[in-house]
Image: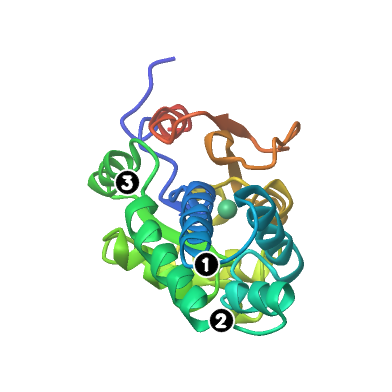
Amino acid sequence: MQQTQEDRQILIKAVFFDLDNTLVDFFRMKQSSVRAAVVAMLDAGLDGSFDETLKQIMEIYKTEGIEYQKVFDSFLEARLGEINYKILASAVVAYRKAREASLVLYPHVTATLTSLVRRGIKLAIITDAPPMQAWLRLCHLNLHHLFDTVIVTEELGALKPSPIPFRKALERLDVQPSQALMIGDWPERDIVGAKKVGIRTVFARYGDPRDVEESFADYEIDDISELNSIIEGLG
Ligand SMILES: [Mg+2]
């Protein structure tokens, strides 16, 4: 049967993105920044080896959370029994400089987002990052004007996989679950959360820092530009 014009219209009207490890290579940024801080601390007079210092800092992140802002204070207190401010300042300055340099988008993110906007598809971010950290990253990468809405789940008091942030995104962009697509790197949060409200899902395998075996997503991609063909296929 011949397709009518209406049949060929694009079904998807909105795409929801996770931020870290989906648009932004957060893992690489964190690694580079912490490594630079360790080098700077050793240079400023801290005793110890690079490897065990790095390991001790990563352990603190594991306990306190990867966004923990006082990691070097805690590290120095644990290591020296007090904060040496020369060493702390060296760490913070090196960390910030490396973060500036290493906070980048994955390949083809800008081109893909631009092509979606050109097609009239609305864009949202749904992130569990702390509000200030999320906006710092978005502003640094000049993404803060591109999205129709940014949902910082902490502000809603409901982190993914709660259905609340997903429903909020649907409501703000005025689309039905069947007209939306969610893309993320964390199955238990991004994929499970979107599925709960009936949104189709895409697993960002290129950003997965956990070596996930089974994502349970409707689609898996190795490059963000594959979103274009997924959306066309759903048309
Ligand atoms: Mg993520």
**How far across and how far down the image is residue 199, in percent?**
60, 50
Which quarter of the image is occupied by the C terminus? Answer: top left
Residue assigned mark 2: 84
Which quarter of the image is occupied by the N terminus? Answer: top left
Residue assigned mark 3: 113
Q: Which numbered disc covers residue 4?
A: none
**Near-viewer residue (156 or 131):** 131
Q: Residue at x 52, y 55 (%)?
A: 30
Quadrant of residue 160 within the rendered picture: bottom right
**Secondary structure at numbered mark 2:** loop
Q: Earlier in the sequence, mark 3 or mark 1?
A: 1
Q: CA distance from mark 3 to mark 1?
A: 46 Å
Q: Amino acid at mark 2?
A: Asn
Residue assigned mark 1: 45
Q: Earlier in the sequence, mark 3 or mark 2?
A: 2
**Secondary structure at numbered mark 1:** loop
Looking at the image, do the residues carrying marks 3 and 1 touch, with CB atoms under 8 Å apart?
no
Q: Residue at x 43, y 36 (%)?
A: 224
**Near-viewer residue (92 or 213):** 92
**How far across and how far down the image is residue 231, in percent?**
43, 35
Question: Foreground mark, 3 or 1?
Answer: 1
**How far across and how far down the image is residue 2, in percent?**
38, 16
Q: CA distance from mark 1 to mark 2?
A: 10 Å
Question: Foreground mark, 1 or 2?
Answer: 1
